[in-house]
Image (tube, rainbow, N blue to C red):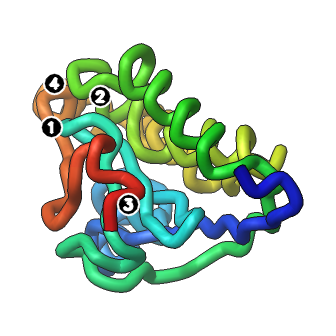
Amino acid sequence: MDVDSSYNVKLYIYDISKGLARQLSAMMLGRQLEGIWHTSIVAYGEELFFGGGGISSCHPGGTLLGMPDSIVDLGNTEVPRDLFLEYLSSLSESVYRPEKYHLFEHNCNNFSCEVAQFLTGAKIPSYITDLPSEVLATPFGQALRPLLDSVTITPPGSNGINGFGQK
């Protein structure tokens, strides 16, 4: 185990609306949204995210979402890769099992925030984590909630957590 190693940690941010949220949100929700955010953590040379398939990994930028719209450098971690793998395994067996995914309350952004805190002590930006409550605070968001509650997002091109670290 490399105890003297430091690893860079990045937050990949994708607008899964591909700009439509920016164009239509004011009219539909009565407030301007810049995007509908999907996030992932890039650490130890892999991109990690949570969706309807549980915790998944791929090469950075390797999902069908392509390259992220923006990248935030969260800093470095001293957490050894082996310890991180144990942490991910524990999460995948408990709070981030596939059936625990929920678009508004338990999604990719919650996962990214929790993993970012574990690795660096930093949270991801609040404009990302606050988005579901902002949408649900609108009449249109409330009207769409029954439909959106059934939505599960799993970006294609990923491997289950068991594939993490097996390049």
* Distance (Cα) linking label 2 and label 3: 17 Å
Query: Which residue has dot 1 on it?
Result: 151
Nearer to us: label 4 or label 2: 2
Q: Amino acid at mark 1?
A: Val
Residue 5 on image: x %, y %: 81, 64
Where is mark 3, residue-wise?
A: 36
Q: Foreground mark, 1 or 2?
A: 2
N-terminal of the pair, mark 1 or mark 4, is 4
Please state which of the two labelled residues, at mark 3 or mark 4, is closer to the viewer.
Answer: 3
Q: For numbered disc 1, what is the local secondary structure?
A: loop
Residue at the spot of label 2: 101
Marked residue nearer the N-terminal end (3 or 4) = 3
Instruction: Verify CB contact (< 8 Å) between mark 3 and mark 4.
Output: no
- Measured Cα–Cα span from mark 1 to mark 4: 10 Å
Tag of residue 146: 4
User: What is the spatial separation of the Cα atoms under label 3 and label 4, in whole angstroms?
Assistant: 18 Å
Q: Are marks 2 and 3 in contact (CB under 8 Å)?
A: no
Q: Earlier in the sequence, mark 1 or mark 3?
A: 3
Residue 24: name its quadrant.
bottom left
User: Distance from label 1 to label 2 (Cα)?
Assistant: 10 Å
C-alpha gap between disc 4 and disc 2: 15 Å
Q: In screen coordinates, is 138 left or right of 119?
A: left
